[in-house]
Image (spheres, grey):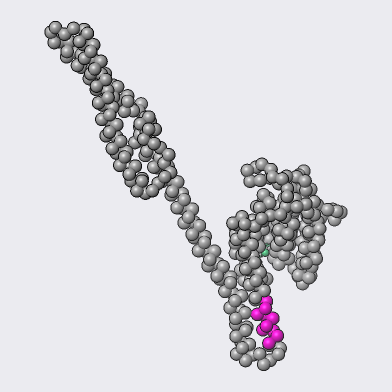
Amino acid sequence: MSFSPRIIAFFLAVLITTVSIVFLSFVPNVSAAMLFVVGVSSFFASFFFVFYTIDILVFREVEQIYKTIQKLKIRDFDISRKTLIRSVNPIKKLNSEISTYVARKQQEIDELKKMEVFRREFLADVSHELKTPIFAAQGFIHTLLDGAMEDPVILERFLNKAAKSLDGLDALVRDLVTLSQVEKGDLKMHFETTDLRHITEEIFEQLESKAKTRGVTLKIKPKELQAAWVTADKQRISQVITNLVDNAIKYGKENGKIIVEIEEEKKYFQVSIEDDGPGISPEHLSRIFERFYRIDKSRSRETGGTGLGLAIVKHILNAHHSKISVTSKIDKGTRFTFKLPVAGELIPNKEGGKVAQH
Ligand SMILES: Nc1ncnc2c1ncn2[C@@H]1O[C@H](COP(=O)(O)OP(=O)(O)OP(=O)(O)O)[C@@H](O)[C@H]1O
Ligand SMILES: [Mg+2]
């Protein structure tokens, strides 16, 4: 049982009154009326005396704690002196408020620390990635300036190499801008009715020569699919499929086969991009969507990859309130899958409700 200042004051008042009446009753010539008056007045006097003494003693401490809190400029405590007087145990209440507050602040500090580590790693990664093409281009140009320019064959070769490095740098900076925009939520999606089959055909055309150099065949399934109308940001979804098909070409099997399968479900089209390449082992599979994560860094740098592609894919699909999933079997291949709502369907929002298409 917990005691509030009121209850304690009441019991003590009853005790003091009883003792006074008992003592007084032994005094000769004391009338019942007198006993009653003394009883009532001693009850009220002792009740208020005890109550305010406890109150002052307790609240002197409470005020002290409050002053400390004020010094810390904490405005998160929504407890007033009134609620503390009403509460059963004000010290307990204040203590629990402070503990909750400290736990919350500790959580915030942990998150900030994690973000700081993440920011530092990101900065290190970015500077490293920027350094590679800059140093390469710088090297070629300085070699030319130091005299290699005389030879027209070397001149052309080195200029081509420098141009390639700078193209890579340009792609990296553009990817970084896109990534920071989608992560900040600055990139506005323009939802429209668009045909997934048509988008895929356009992408196949763009990547045809790249696929040819590796002898890779690109296929859409089912063959007889005429169109797949969905609600999506055409440009961004095109970027998603391009990234996935590009990866399948780069990291899939030489002379292999890539299939983009578009299946209609009730209210969604499910898109899968599948290759028959070497696959991804489980320890890498859970990490490939992280920025700059590459399984084979040297091979992926050779192919011009910076490890941002899948991070961008994930964020674009998040902005469509969709998720990307991946399954992979070593030596069998990898399959990336996501869903988009059939055109005319409302796009689900984060709260589980629906928003109209734009
Ligand atoms: N289909 C795949 N098969 C095997 N490995 C893959 C496949 N797709 C991605 N990966 C691995 O996942 C890593 C991350 O892919 P991601 O697309 O994010 O980066 P990237 O292709 O290296 O660079 P970028 O896309 O920025 O040019 C790749 O480096 C590769 O190691
Ligand atoms: Mg990629």
State the residue lying farthest toward the left: 28
The magenta-colored residue range is 155-164
Residue at the image point whose x is 24% and y is 21% from the top: 45
Residue at the image point whose x is 32% and y is 24% from the top: 7
Q: How many marks?
A: 0
User: Where ligand 1 lies, by image quadrant?
Assistant: bottom right
Q: Give coordinates of residue 263: x percent, y percent.
A: 78, 50
- Decide if residue 330 is in sight here: no
Q: What secondary structure characterizes most of the magenta part?
A: helix
Residue 189 shown left or right of residue 100 in the figure: right
As for residue 162 lying within the magenta part, the answer is: yes
Residues 247 and 347: in front is 347
Kindly indicate the quadrant of the structure image that contains residue 79.
top left
Kindly indicate the quadrant of the structure image that contains residue 44.
top left
- Decide if residue 153 is in sight here: yes
Kindly indicate the quadrant of the structure image that contains residue 144.
bottom right
In this picture, is 305 found above or below 41? below
Residue 283 shown left or right of residue 237 in the figure: left
Residues 286 and 322: in front is 322
In this picture, is 33 found above or below 237? above
In this picture, is 50 found above or below 93? above
As for residue 222 lying within the magenta part, the answer is: no
Residue at the image point whose x is 60% and y is 64% from the top: 292
* Quadrant where the image shows the N terminus: top left
Q: Give coordinates of residue 322: x percent, y percent.
A: 68, 50
Q: Give coordinates of residue 99: x percent, y percent.
A: 40, 42
In this picture, is 325 found above or below 90? below
Q: Give coordinates of residue 43: x percent, y percent.
A: 25, 18
